[in-house]
Image (cartoon, rainbow, N blue to C red):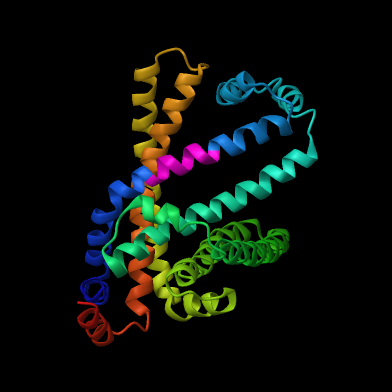
Amino acid sequence: MKEYLLRFRSQAFDGAMSLFKRILLPSIVLNIVMTVISLAVLVPLFIKSFNWTMADFMNFGERMREIAEDSNNSSEVIAGMFSTVNYTFFFLTMLIGLLIYCWMFYTMLKLNDNEVRYRNNSFASALAQSLSGKIFTILGYVLVYAIFYTVATVIFFFIIVTLMTLSKALGIILGFLGFIMIMIQMLRFALGFPAIVHGNMGIADAISYSFRHLTFKRALMLFLIFIIIGIAFIILSTIIAAITSAVVGDSSASITAFIIAQLFSSLASAVLGAFIYASMTALYFRYSSDETEEIDVKDHLVN
């Protein structure tokens, strides 16, 4: 652990890259395994929510493209697709989906934690340790984040609408700047997730830790980095879509095509996700209270 801490605290980016290289392959495998599990659970629930068939689900993307090309009957087509909703299954899908999202978040950060502390980058170990009560802590953190974001957005739109009545140009300019400000402030929550996993913190402590160490200036830098990552993801997604199309040809409605598309998408997400998770871990330990001297003593005693 000492080596990682020294890297994180001297050059956070270099430390994050070192961690990224170690956990990239396990992260890809773990992401694929968890995606398969997620799809096996969520797809049947989603289909049941709207009384669709499997063919309807696999053709959803194609139907949406057709609607975008022909907007004359779009409202009728969309209404027909979602005309019958089973709200019990719909809310069950949303709840389980949110829990799976928190489970995946915890597992990916647990993989990092094992690597940083014990030099253990086994995806099997992270998966075996993934069923933890901390998943519900992350869920609570996500809900708090959602509440903050919703309140901030409502207040923001109320102010912008009021300004638009006075000056449309002023409302547009301040609206754009205000949106960026909100996104930067929301990024200040980012360290809360690794604080929960790496620091074993509760929701309140995680929020305090994140806001204390992710200042506005640091959050602004993260915002700019995420813009670059977003552009890279769009480019990568386009390449993946082209590869998928070349592999499956015109059989876009087949189960094979659907599985291949999901695997390619999972691969792209795993690569970018591994870097994001590694960066979050590096930032957490950069500001954590872990001491290298204490680690030396512990490592000596273990040896």
Q: Is residue 247 above or below residue 189?
A: above
Residue drawn where x is 63% and y is 61% of the image:
146
Q: Position of residue 140 (x, y in %)?
A: 63, 65
Which quadrant of the structure image shows residue 284? bottom left
As for residue 107 lying within the magenta part, the answer is no
As rendered, which of 117 and 163 lies closer to the eye?
A: 117
Q: Position of residue 30 (x, y in %)?
A: 39, 46
35 vs 156, left or right, is: left
Pick the quarter of the image with the N terminus.
bottom left
- From the image, give the main secondary structure of the stretch colored magenta: helix
Residue drawn where x is 72% and y is 22% of the image:
77
Q: Is residue 265 above or below residue 188?
A: above
Pick the quarter of the image with the C terminus.
bottom left
Numbered label tally: 0
Query: Which residues are the magenta region?
Result: 30-38
Residue 57 visible, this orientation: yes
Residue drawn where x is 47% and y is 81% of the image:
212
44 vs 2, left or right, is: right
As rendered, which of 37 and 206 lies closer to the eye?
A: 37
Residue 232 visible, this orientation: no
Which quadrant of the structure image shows residue 287? bottom left
21 vs 200, left or right, is: left
As for residue 34 lying within the magenta part, the answer is yes
Residue drawn where x is 40% and y is 53% of the image:
227
As rendered, which of 119 and 27 lies closer to the eye?
A: 119
Q: Position of residue 145 (x, y in %)?
A: 60, 65
Q: Position of residue 175 (x, y in %)?
A: 59, 60
